[in-house]
Amino acid sequence: MSSLHLSIGGLAAINRGLAEDPAMARRELLIAMTEATLLVEREAKERMPRGATGLTAQSIQSDAFSTPAGVLGVVSSSLPSASAVELGTRPHMPPMDALVPWVRAVLGVSPKRERSVAYLVARKIARRGTPAQQPFAKAIAATESRVLRMFEAAAGRIAARSAGGAS
């Protein structure tokens, strides 16, 4: 799991801004969080396997919002397939009808053989499950330094506005 480490100066500037002008500091942090979540969303969509339809990648969304607890950002998908791709699955027998479009689109199997190939794929999943592909974790790791720079820049803007008295 990735983590974000701001400099002591950046944290001090944010704390000072939150104490002196909380609305301005939250606005700057929300701008940084919005930019960061959009970046991670784009990276996660690019890393999500397309499968037969690409619907899982298309379902990825981000949101940033300010709460009394702080500024929060979320990148997620409402589809169960996203967590199955991220975390992998235990061995289970998937429905064959769901695999046929995947076999056709991804493996390029002829219509004549698609059901038999889908059955073979289902048997393999029943024996081994599916591996974790971690598109979200990889997106976070790939964007960590850019996200850090976004928050360092926000801390700089907060420090400048606190020092200048402008909001």
Image (spheres, rainbow, N blue to C red):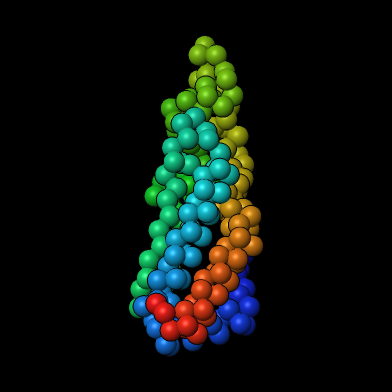
Of residues 166 and 80, the one nearer the viewer is: 166
Q: Quadrant of the C terminus?
A: bottom left
Measured as percent of width and height from the top left, residue 26 is found at 41, 74
Whether residue 33 is visible, yes or no, is yes
Q: Quadrant of the N terminus?
A: bottom right
Q: Report the residue at 48% width, 47% height from top.
A: 82
Of residues 121 and 7, the one nearer the viewer is: 7
Q: Does 147 sit left or right of 21 as displayed?
A: right
Whether residue 80 is visible, yes or no, is no
Total residue callouts: 0
Measured as percent of width and height from the top left, residue 53 is found at 46, 31
Q: Report the residue at 47% width, 83% height from top.
A: 164
Q: Does 135 sit left or right of 58 as displayed?
A: right
Measured as percent of width and height from the top left, residue 46 is found at 56, 43
Q: Report the residue at 48% width, 54% height from top.
A: 38
Q: Report the residue at 55% width, 75% height from top.
A: 156
Measured as percent of width and height from the top left, residue 101 is found at 47, 25
Of residues 4 and 23, the one nearer the viewer is: 23
Q: Quadrant of residue 8?
A: bottom right
Q: Quadrant of residue 126?
A: top right
Q: Is residue 149 above or below residue 89?
A: below
